[in-house]
Image (cartoon, rainbow, N blue to C red):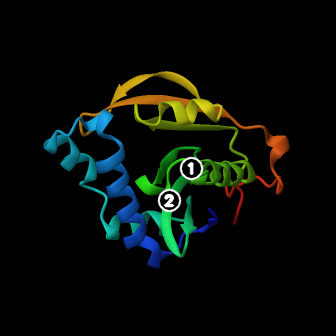
Amino acid sequence: MSFTIRPAQSDDAASVCNVLRRSIAECCSLDHGGESSMLAAWLGNKTSDNVAAWIGTPTNHTVVAERDGVVAGVALVNQAGKLSLCYVLPEAQGVGLGKALLLAVEEQARSWGVSVVRLHGTATAQGFFARHGYIFAGKEKSCYGLECDLFWKKLDAEQSSQGAKFCNCNAR
């Protein structure tokens, strides 16, 4: 099954929102346990307007995976090295979309000079991140009551194809 990874655009917001909402509701039941109040809190900020704002934030890099012309996955990293999103549609799991999305945002982080990527992950995604070199660093409660796994990964700067560092501290 073929797919394409590309930068997200503002007109992808509704499709990305669909990926987030479906993935959380259908794939993360281990985390929300079907508890409607927890699920509602988790999905509360997953709106098209918010997603469009996340995509448009200059310090974020958001990519989508397209399969058969449909947005089937999304990942977002910021310039501080926080991986905020890495989700795929339920029917798109297990075909490499998540891995490709993760590699794309890690490459962007390297190009910014980020040396460590951090994330708050779910129990559902624990194995995925561990398989891709992320180290478990403990647990923490999220603002909507979900227990999250803290993960981090040291990036190898040698793997960066661009090698550029982001810093506008001396820009005038």
Query: Is residue 71 visible to the viewer in this orientation of the structure?
Result: yes
Q: Position of residue 93 (x, y in %)?
A: 50, 50
Q: Position of residue 69 (x, y in %)?
A: 53, 76
Q: Which residue is mark 2?
A: 73
Q: Position of residue 113 (x, y in %)?
A: 73, 47
Q: Position of residue 119 (x, y in %)?
A: 50, 38
Q: Mark 2: which amino acid?
A: Gly
For numbered disc 2, what is the local secondary structure? strand
Query: Residue at point 40% right, 60% down?
Result: 19
Seen in the image, is 28 located left or right of residue 44? right
Number of numbered discs present?
2
Seen in the image, is 43 located left or right of residue 106? left
- Dividing the picture into quadrants, the one containing residue 2 is bottom right
The residue closer to the viewer here, 110 or 171, is 110
Q: How would you rate the neighbour count of disc 1 (Cα within 10 Å): few for under 14, some for 14-19, many for 20 or more?
A: many
Marking on residue 98: 1
The residue closer to the viewer here, 160 or 133, is 133
Residue furthest to the top: 138
Q: Earlier in the sequence, mark 1 or mark 2?
A: 2
Q: Is residue 41 above or below residue 124?
A: below
Q: Is residue 136 above or below residue 122?
A: above
Q: Mark 1: which amino acid?
A: Gly
Q: Is residue 166 above or below residue 65?
A: above
